[in-house]
Image: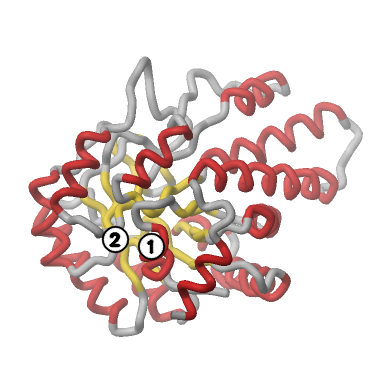
Amino acid sequence: MIVTTKELFQHAYGKYAIGAYNINNLEQCEGLFQGNVRSEAPFIIQISKGARSYTHKAYLEAIIKAANEIHPEAIFAVHLDHGDEKTCYDCIDSGFYSSVMIDASSFPYEENIAITKRVVERAHAKGLVVEAELGQLKGVEEDVAAAEHVYTKPEEVVDFVTKTGCDSLACAIGTSHGAFKFSGDQKLRYDILEEVQKQIPGFPLVMHGSSSVPQGEVARINAAGGEIKGAKGVDATQFLGAAKRGVTKINIDTDGRLVWTRVHREFFRDQPAGFDLRIPGKIFIKEYADFIYEKNCLLGAAGQLESVKAFLKK
């Protein structure tokens, strides 16, 4: 069942965080549904601007619709990740998405407000929910790139949320896009997160760039011919700490790509004569479902499904 992120955030706030997972193809979608159904967790399917143009947006929408029919017990939202203004409008007008993210964080503050407000007005008119971003994450994710961290300024959040009317706010607290997030003993900036929560208590916050980049996955990829060096992600044991401080949505993309890469590298290394793409595809679906199950346990989302269903009926 497709719901809005706003409904999910109301249930999760202060207790757990909902996993927001990016997909690009059928195998990722099926693994995602299997893992969430098995862990009895609500979840968010994220479709990026790049994913929508990878083949054609209609393919992904059709795959998700089919998965919804195949797994009727699932409760999830369909969300545009890191959209520009044009892409947000296209998703709003499509009638398929339940929420969109307008990422105008690279623009000056006042322009970020103006762009976000326009998207909010158009989305709310059709019952959609809007995520905005204040501050910038270092790293590269498709069309989104920043050379350095621009941490969210807690003193700006009340003004920004009030003027834009956004429904949730992505904060820059030290995470990064991609597989190279941290160096040394760098940690999440809980101090910034705590101050933001004080400024807008009860308001849903979002943490982007939150893949943990499992070192076991990286090692296996490299052992199978990969060259991923120095990758380090978010300590997944910090997820619940973030949830207690108002984070209701945690974005995870890179980890899923690592699982995909590891499965395929190992398969074709061990089966050099193999050419049936369905075999590693089936392996990946199972491996990705296992990965999603484990992530939902760390997020505190596992086992929440029945409680969410009861909450939605109120």
Query: Along the horizontal axis of the image, is 24 left or right of 102?
Result: right
Residue 122 in picture, x, y percent from top left = 27, 79
Residue 9: numbered disc: 1
Query: Along the horizontal axis of the image, is 253 left or right of 91?
Result: right
The answer, for residue 140, to whether it is visible in the render is: no
Circle 2 residue: 168
Residue extending farthest bottom = 125
The residue located at (67%, 45%) in the rendering is 288
The answer, for residue 90, to whether it is visible in the render is: yes
Residue contact at pointers 1 and 2, CB within 8 angstroms: yes
Q: Secondary structure at mark 2?
A: strand
Q: Secondary structure at mark 1?
A: helix
The residue under label 1 is which amino acid type? Phe
Residue extending farthest right = 273
Residue 150 in picture, x, y percent from top left = 21, 37
Q: Quadrant of the C terminus?
A: bottom left
Q: Nearer the viewer, residue 113 or 235?
A: 235
Q: CA distance from mark 1 to mark 2?
A: 9 Å
Query: In which quadrant of the rendered view does residue 176 lie?
Result: top left
The residue under label 2 is which amino acid type? Ser
Q: Nearer the viewer, residue 235 or 55?
A: 235
